[in-house]
Amino acid sequence: MKASLAQLRAALDKPGATRLFLLHGPDEASAREFARQLARAMGADAERVDLEGAQLKGDPGLLAGEAAALSLFGGARFIRVNAVGEESLEAIELLLNAPVAGNPVVAIAPGVKSTGKLVKAAQAHPRALAFACYLPEGAAADRVAIEIGQSLGLRIDPRLAGRLAAAAGADRAVLSRELEKFALFLDASPDQPQALSEAVVDQLGADLGEVELGDAIEAAVAGAPDRLGAELARLEQAGTSPIPLLRALVRRLITLAELRAEVAAGARAEALAERVFFKERAATLAALRHWAPERLAAAIDHLRAAERRLMAGGPDVTAAAACIAVARQGRRR
């Protein structure tokens, strides 16, 4: 079933008969935030089983088996699958058609297209929900900030919501972490809501908008590891979290990959460059000439893997190493 945002949230809070939550689209941060919502609904003592999409290619029956297995501790159990691609179609079909599957599965598929077989299979099945994750823009991003705040017991003025969304780059995960901090400070909860003020945001907010990530991203895309190293040192001195940098660089590479595909189909690179911000046009043209599609795909996968390691408690240097590796790939002609 193709789910709306409201349907997805309701089902994540009460999985019931839903066997599969397929979260596809480029906004991987939102997909992971939805996966955390399922984890909260399952309870703090629930057993979480982590799988990778590559595992399912070699063992398609693994997913259905894990979904039907009992928890080692006799409690709730759910499965999270990272980096799912079209190669996981057989595993997903086996899961959906299995006679028994008591544990819900949330599958994060950032590289899967809405027109692909995997998404269509999930949309066609009554026990699956498919939801496309895209970065919200403009008023939609402001509404996301307000909705997340409401779930935490924060009342947020629309103008302040716009400031928060812009500072977080419309990244749902970054927004959530910031708003959780404000809610804790104000002792806010859905039962006892509190108004979030500009003064509190000024006092506690990371104000990510003040930290310019653009120079580091341009250095990585241009294949300039030495320049990137200096930018990474500057960002570290500013106390910037490495997660927004990784996600911003992934978004830039995804844009390049999409433009590169159009060039391969016969479009003129100069015409395509008109779509991007005018300050990025020259760099975009240069990147389109020297980034091959397979290297773009590998770089995106490398950065996403680095983010997963960070989210699992890895050291901050993981992000710097991943970005430098991408810059070295970009240096190859």
Image (tube, grey):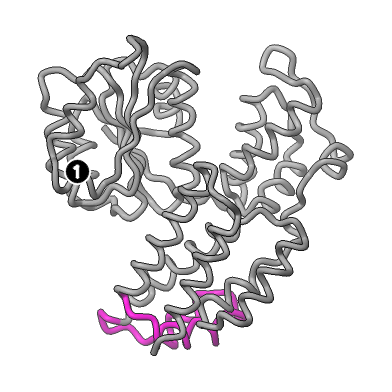
Residue 112 drawn at (x, y percent):
29, 52
Residue found at the very far top of the displayed protein: 74
247 left or right of 83 in image: right
Q: Give the residues in magenta.
A: 264-293
The residue that appears at 48% across and 28% down in the rendered structure is: 37
Q: Secondary structure at mark 1?
A: helix
Quadrant occupied by the N terminus: top left
Report if residue 58 lies within the magenta region.
no
The residue that appears at 66% across and 34% down in the rendered structure is: 146
Report if residue 291 lies within the magenta region.
yes
| Badge 1: residue crowd in 10 Å (few <14, some 14–19, many ≥20) | many
281 left or right of 75 in image: right
Residue 211 drawn at (x, y percent):
74, 62
Q: Splitting the image into 4 quarters, where does residue 8 fall?
A: top left
Vertically, is 215 above or below 103? below
Q: Splitting the image into 4 quarters, where does residue 262 fall?
A: bottom left
Q: Splitting the image into 4 quarters, where does residue 101 fall?
A: top left
Tell which of 262 and 283 is nearer to you: 283
Secondary structure mostly taken by the magenta-highlighted segment of the chain: helix
The residue that appears at 63% across and 75% down in the rendered structure is: 229
Tell which of 131 and 233 is nearer to you: 233
Tell which of 228 and 125 is nearer to you: 228
Which residue is tagged 1? 56
Vertically, is 251 above or below 157? below
235 left or right of 285 in image: right
Quadrant occupied by the C terminus: bottom left
The residue that appears at 39% across and 81% down in the rendered structure is: 291
- Number of numbered discs on residues: 1
Amino acid at circle 1:
Leu
